[in-house]
Image: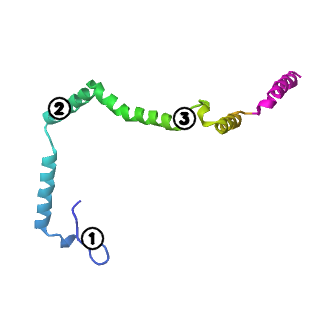
């Protein structure tokens, strides 16, 4: 337990320890142990203070709402910035026929298939139903 001096080979040299140093180390160890030891009422008081803090923090629901507010704000901002609106563009008649043409091109590009092939889509669906039933 006590530090001992070592010789050049790394072996413990028990004769090199000064008895006064050993006594001073023993007294220091006892004083440290005495300062660490606390009476029972100290630990009971500690327990009561900790429990009182826990109960008081549970009694305030505002703190929970304040902790959830940044998360709700982050979710709202993500939805606002990353969810696209599916609103179709409306033509500005004052801009002229070029604007109308550009809007029609944009609408055509947003469709899954061209307008002229819509009847073929119905035919394809019917053939697909027949193929599944067989």
**Local secondary structure at mark 1:** loop
> Which quarter of the rendering shows the N terminus?
bottom left
Q: Badge 3: few (under 14), some or many (20 or more) residues near its Cα, within 10 Å?
A: few
Q: Badge 1: few (under 14), some or many (20 or more) residues near its Cα, within 10 Å?
A: few
Q: In front here: 18 or 83?
A: 83
User: To which quarter of the image does residue 131 belong?
Assistant: top right
Mark 1–mark 3 Cα distance, whole angstroms, equals 74 Å
- Decide if residue 62 is on the left or right side of residue 73: left
Between circles 2 and 3, the one closer to the viewer is: 3
Q: Is residue 102 magenta?
A: no
Between circles 1 and 2, the one closer to the viewer is: 2
- Measured as percent of width and height from the top left, residue 107 is found at 68, 34
119 to 73, vertically: above or below: above
N-terminal-most mark, 1 or 2: 1
**Local secondary structure at mark 3:** loop
Q: Residue at x 21, y 62 (%)?
A: 2
Q: In front here: 110 or 72?
A: 110
89 to 28, vertically: above or below: above
Residues in magenta, as a range: 113-134
Q: Badge 2: few (under 14), some or many (20 or more) residues near its Cα, within 10 Å?
A: few
Which of the numbered marks, if any, corresponds to residue 83? Answer: 3
Between circles 1 and 3, the one closer to the viewer is: 3
Residue at the bottom extreme of this rendering: 8
Residue picked out by circle 1: 12
- Decide if residue 42 is on the left or right side of residue 131: left
**Visible in this render: residue 92?**
no
Secondary structure mostly seen in the magenta stretch:
helix
Which of the numbered marks, if any, corresponds to residue 44? Answer: 2
- Measured as percent of width and height from the top left, residue 27 is found at 11, 57
């Amino acid at each position: 337990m006590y530090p001992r001096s070592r010789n050049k080979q790394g072996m413990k040299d028990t004769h090199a320890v000064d008895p006064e140093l050993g006594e001073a180390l023993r007294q220091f160890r006892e004083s440290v142990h005495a300062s660490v030891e606390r009476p029972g009422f100290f630990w009971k008081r500690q327990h009561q203070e900790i429990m009182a803090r826990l109960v008081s923090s549970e009694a305030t629901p505002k703190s929970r709402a304040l902790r959830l507010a940044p998360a709700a704000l982050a979710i709202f901002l993500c939805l606002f910035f990353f969810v696209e609106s599916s609103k179709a563009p409306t033509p500005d008649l004052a801009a002229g026929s070029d604007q109308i043409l550009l809007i029609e091109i944009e609408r055509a590009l947003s469709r899954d298939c061209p307008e002229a092939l819509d009847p073929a889509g119905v035919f394809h669906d019917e053939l697909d139903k027949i193929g599944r039933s067989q």
